[in-house]
Image (spheres, rainbow, N blue to C red):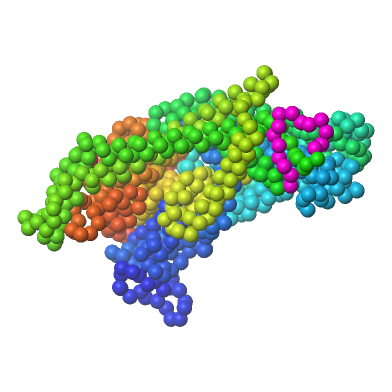
Amino acid sequence: MPLVRFDTDPVQRPAGLVPPIPDLTGVTEIRLHGVGGTTPQDLLGDDAPLQVSGDRIAGFYRSADVAGRHVEAYSWGGMTSRAGSRVLWLLLFPFALANVAGWMCSPRTYASGWRFRLHRTAARWAALFLTLNLLLISVITALELLAYQCGGRARCAEQSWLLRPLRDPLLAEFPGRRLLLGALVPLALVALLAVLTLRSVGRYEAVSPPLRVLATQSTRSAAQPGVGLSDPSFWAGRRSTLDLGQLHLGAGLGFVGLSLAHTVHATSSVAGAPVTAGWLHASVLLVGGGLLLAVLVLTALDACPAGSARGVLAVGAATLVGAGWFAAIQPGYAQPFGYLPGIPLVSNLTLGAVFVSLLLVLVAALCGGWHRGTFVVFGPFVAQVLGVFALNVVLLGAMSRFADLVAEVSSRSTLPSAPTTGAEVYIYPIVGKLVNYLTLVPLALILLFVLYELGVYWRAGTDRATVDRIRGWYRANVAEPTDERRWQYDAAGGGMSTSDVLAPSPDGRAWAARVARARRFARMAHDLDKLMTLMAVAVTAVVIAIQVRYVVYGKLPWGTQWTYTLGSYLASGIPLAVIVLLRRGWRNLASRRRIGVLWDVMTFWPRAYHPLAPPSYAERAVPEVQRRLWRIHDRGGRVVVTAHSQGTVIAAAALLQPHSRPDDDVVGLVTFGSPLRTLYGWAFPAYFGDAVLRQLSPSERTAAAAVHEWRNFYYLTDYIGGPVLAADAGAPADRGGPDERVDVELPDPPSSWHIYGQPEPAAGRHSGYWADPAVWLTVDRLASELATTTTTVPLPRSRPEDSTRLRPVPRRAPTARPAPGC
C-alpha cells in the first residue's frame, strides 16, 4: 500500500494483501510524465504507489489523496525506455526518419487532396526504396564479397571458418549454388524485420481507442488528406500497418529473388557457360518486376484491397523460390576473376529509384509551399535525405569492416589481371570515395556547428544590456522575502536584506550572465533544422558531383586507401559507440531523459509511411488515456490532467478526439514544459498548428474538443517547452506573443533571493515545473472548481453532428498572471 513521502495521513486498506478498490468519484488528477520514463514513484512522490490499471510496461498508479482529490500517474515510459535493449531500435533510425518525413507536410499540402496524395505517394515510395536499399547492401556484402569473390578462391575462403564450407566440392565449382547460399543473409534480414514488425504491432497498435459509436476496424491509415488528430481512427492503425508491412516484406523477398536470378544468369553468360532453364530466369524477372510495380501502386492507394497485401507476400516468396531453384540447377564452371557480374545493374537501378523518389519528395514539398515559423526548408525532403545518407554511410562502412574479418578489403581503381597470392576482396572504387566524403564532410559540418553554438552561448553571458535587463527585472518585480530576513541574500546584486552586512555584496552580473546563457541555450534547439538542412544539401551536392565526375568524365575524386579505411571505421564505429554510450546512459534516469527527447518525438507518429520503423508508443498510450478518462466519467468523476513535456502531446492527442470522449465530460488541463508549439508545431504544422491546438482552448465555446480550462506554463530557459497558442489565431510559431488566456510565462529562476551560504538560485530549465508553487496552486484551484460541478448539470460540448449547441453554463474567465517580461 502507498507509503507517501510528503503525506502522513493513513490510507484505508482491506485486510491481508487484497488491494483496495480505487474510488473514481469526485475529482481525479492524472499526471503524465515526459521523456525518459519517469517512474511512478518519482511522479507521485510516493515510495509504493498502487497500480490500478495497465501492466508493467504502461499503467496507471495511485497515491494517497491530496487536497481533496485523488492523484494518479500514467507511466508510459516502459514503451520507450524501460529496458536497456530498447536502444537497439536505433539501428532502425533511418526508417524512423523516413516515417517522420511523411508527417512533416505543410498545412497547404494537408488541406489539398491531390497535393497530399502526391506527398504521401512520394514519401511512401522513398520509404519503400529505403528498405530495398538496405537489402541491396546486404546483397552486395553476402553475394558479391563473401559468396562470389572470397568463396571463389580457395586461399581466401580457407582463412575463415565461416567461409570454409564454400570450398566443399558441391559448392566450390558451382558459383550459382554459392550465390544461393549467400542469399540466406538478406533473407534472414527480411525475416528479422518481419518478426520485429509483428511483435511490435501486437504490443502497440492492438489497443484501439474508445468510440461513442462502435465501428469496424478501418483498413485506411492515418495518412489521409484533411484527416488529423481528431479523426477517431487516427490511432487505430493496426490493419493498415500490417498491410503496409507485408507490402515491404513482399517487395524485399522479390528484390532478393531478382538480384539472385540476375547475378546467376550474368555470371554464367560472362563465363561462357551454358544456362540451364533460361525460361525460369525470364519468369522470375517478369514476376518479380510485376511484383515491384504492383507494390508501387498499392502503396499509393488510400487502403490496400482485401487480401492484396498477403498476395504480394506470397508472390514475393514464390519469386525467391523460383530464383533459388534457378541458381541451384546451374552447372559448374570456373568463374571469372573480378567483380560479381550483374551487381552494377542491380545497384544502379535501386539507387536510381532512391534518387528519383527523393526528387519526387522535393517536388511534393515545393507544391505544398513553406511558411515562416516552421522547419527552415522543406522538412520532408531533408528528413528523407538524411535517412538515406545515414543508412548508406553506416552500412557501407559496416560492410567493409565485416568483409575485413575474412579478407583484406581493397578499393583500388584497377583490378589485377589475375588473383593475388593474398586473400583480397575488392570494393568498387566509387564506393570507397563516397564513404570518405559522406563521413568526413558531415562530421566537419557538425564540428563547425558546435563551435558556432559555443561561441554564441559564451557571448550571451557577456552582453551587458541583456545582463542588466535581467538584473533589473528581478530587483523590480521579485518581492523581498519576509522570513529570515537577516539571512536573505539577493543574487541579482541587491545585497543583504538588512543593513547588518554579514558578507560582501556582489553586483550580481555573474548570476545574471548564467541566466542569460541558460536562455540562449534554450534557443539552440531551434537551430538544429539549419544544421540538418545544411547536411542534407551538402550530402546531395557531394553525391551529384562525384557521380557526374565519374560517369561523364571517368574520374574519381581524391582519396587514398587510408582515407577509405578511416571513413569506413568512422561510419561503422560511430553507431556502435553511440549504442554503447546510450546503453550505459540508460541506467541513469537523468541521462535517459536527455537521450530520449529526440527518440520519443520520432516514435510518436503511427507507422503510416514506413511500417518497419520503430513502433509508435502513442498507438497504445493515447487510447489508454482516453479509456481511463471515460471510465472515471462513467463513475461520476471529473479529471484534471497535468502533463509535462512529451506527456502534453499525449494529453492533447487524447483530448482532440471528440468521438473518443463522452458528450458531457468535464476536463481541466494543466501543461508545462510543452513542446506542442515549439517543436511539434514547428516540425509538423499540419497536425499541431495553432488552428488545431485552439480546438482545446476554453475560449472556443463551439469547439467539439474544448476543455473546461487550459493553463500552460513555460520558462524562457526551457529548451523544449514554450507557449502553445499564438495571441492571434493562425499566427506562425515565431510571430506574435502567446495567448495569455492559456499561456503563462513564469520566471526562472523564480527568485533571485536565497539564504546566504547556500547555492544561488539555479534555472529549472525543463524540469523545474514540478517544484514550482505557481503551477500547483493552479492545479489546486482547478480541482476545487471541478469539484463543484460533480453533482451539478454537466457542461455539454457541441459536436460535429450538432454544431448549434453551446455551453449552457457560463465560463469563468481565466486569470492571467503578468508575464515576467525579462
Magenta stretch containing residue 640, yes or no?
A: no
> Which quadrant is home to the N terminus?
bottom left
Tell me where residue 453 appears, x and y as whole percent: 38, 37
Tell me where residue 657 appears, x and y as whole percent: 45, 46
Check the image and report above or below for 570 versus 644.
above
Residue at horizontal 77 percent and vertical 47 percent from the top: 184
- Of residues 122 and 461, the one drawn nearer to the viewer in this rendering: 461
Provide the major secondary structure of the magenta segment: loop
Residue at horizontal 32 percent and vertical 39 percent from the top: 458
- Of residues 390 and 7, the one drawn nearer to the viewer in this rendering: 390
Residue at horizontal 37 percent and vertical 67 percent from the top: 46
- Of residues 779 and 597, the one drawn nearer to the viewer in this rendering: 597
Query: Magenta segment range?
Result: 406-420
Check the image and report above or below for 507 versus 339.
below
> Is 289 situated left or right of 644 in this image?
right
- Of residues 543 and 119, the one drawn nearer to the viewer in this rendering: 543
